[in-house]
Amino acid sequence: MCDEPSVVSAFAGCTHGTSVQLWTVQGVGHVFAFTDALVPDAVGFLLAHPQR
């Protein structure tokens, strides 16, 4: 996902086909700098889950 170790937690059971994921990047604060390495994963998630 990016240069830092990370954990993606997905949550099931949401209504109306909603997907929820929590992306936790280890070793950084609450706000971190998005890097070019993160862009493909973030954009891929958004494109796979369009707003309805």
Image: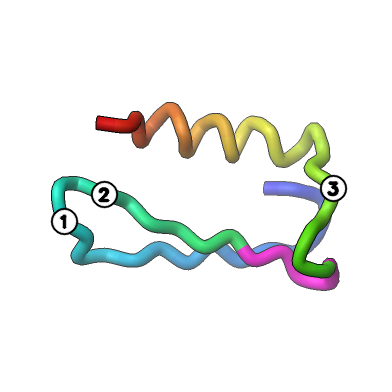
Q: Residue at 38%, 57% (x, y): give it.
A: 20
Q: Secondary structure at mark 2?
A: loop
Q: CA distance from mark 2 to mark 1?
A: 6 Å
Q: Give the overall secondary structure of the magenta segment.
A: loop
Q: Secondary structure at mark 3?
A: loop
- Left/right placement of residue 7 relative to residue 49 reads right
Which amino acid is tagged 3? Ala
Residue of label 3? 33
Q: Residues within 10 Å of mark 1 (few under 14, many from 20)?
A: few
Which of the two discs, 3 and 2, labels the residue nearer the N terminus?
2
Q: Nearer the viewer, residue 34 or 7?
A: 34
The magenta segment is: 24-28
Residue of label 2? 18
- Left/right placement of residue 51 relative to residue 37 reads left
Q: Are marks 3 and 2 in contact (CB under 8 Å)?
A: no
Residue of label 1? 15
Which of the two discs, 1 and 3, labels the residue nearer the N terminus?
1
- Left/right placement of residue 39 relative to residue 46 reads right
Q: How is the image coloured?
A: rainbow
Q: Are marks 2 and 1 in contact (CB under 8 Å)?
A: yes
